[in-house]
Image (tube, helix red, strand yellow):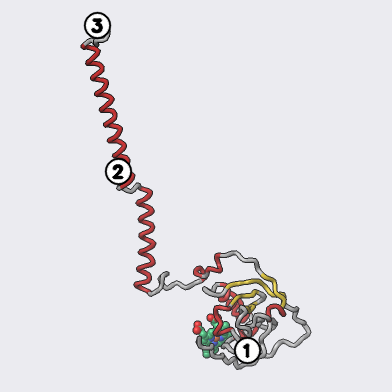
Amino acid sequence: MEHTQKRPQQQVKQRHSTKTIKSTKTTISSAQSHSASSKGSQPSKKQSILQGILLSIVFFFLSSYLVTDTWFWGYNGKYLNWHRWIPRKQIVFTQNELAQYDGSDPTKKIFLAVKGEVFDVTAGGPYYSKGGGYGFFSGKDASRAYTTGCFQTHLTHDLRGLTANQLADVDGWATFYRDHPKYFKVGTVILDPIDPNSPIPEDCNKPVAPKPASK
Ligand code: HEM
């Protein structure tokens, strides 16, 4: 009996240690609940930054739409052309192959070339389809006519005799198609070499701009 009875000092020690365990448990559980609340209700620094970015993006688009009626503050340039962001295998056309895409068949795409670069201008159907205001450019490389405006006699890639300014004009049109928000480059065309002994196409003098067809 004497052996089983605990001495008072021992009892105090035990009581004290039970108390310590209890208080430790309380501390742990309070710490756990604190960390849970900080995870749950209070966003971390990372979350706040992310929320800030998302809100700014939404604000950017909404305010643009409200102010300019467009989603990008009126920007409608080359970077909005999704074709630009998709790498595509470039096609090498012969002139005959290119001619298949002259806009006369509404089920086919419309291609044209400037200085050997071939562009898909299907999105400009009203201009480039058969009967469209600039339909004569389709299915071929008519670089010369882009600067001379001789839309009957200069539908050729023969650039002989053009001035530096005129050549820059032609380059400008290639850039126009390359950087257009809807047109895009699909490849190149192998052009017949120009016979150096053939006569340089005569200037028509009177460029008459055809009316682009209404959409
Ligand atoms: C060298 C002479 C010219 C060339 C090579 C040329 C070429 C072109 C081309 C390729 C387009 C289609 C643009 C597209 O795909 O979006 C176009 C559009 C147009 N062109 Fe010409 N053009 C010439 C002269 C003229 C002249 C002299 C006028 C006016 C009298 C004119 C009036 C127009 C108009 C109003 C459009 C439609 C523009 C639009 O709706 O965005 N062009 N031109």
**Which structural element holds mark 1?**
loop
- Across and down, in percent, residue 162 comes to 66, 83
**Real-space Cα separation, disc 3 to disc 2, in angstroms:** 52 Å
Q: Residues within 10 Å of mark 2 (few under 14, many from 20)?
A: few
Q: Residue at x 28, y 25 (%)?
A: 21
Amino acid type of the residue that numbered disc 1 sits on in the rendered structure:
Phe
- Which residue in the structure is indicated by mark 3? 2
Ligand 1 location (quadrant): bottom right
**Real-space Cα separation, disc 2 to disc 1, in angstroms:** 75 Å
User: Camera-side residue: 149 or 102?
Assistant: 102
Where, quadrant-wise, is the N terminus in this rendering?
top left
Mark number displayed over residue 37: 2
**Real-space Cα separation, disc 1 to disc 3, in angstroms:** 123 Å
Amino acid type of the residue that numbered disc 2 sits on in the rendered structure:
Ser
- Across and down, in percent, residue 192 comes to 74, 79
- Which residue in the structure is indicated by mark 1? 151
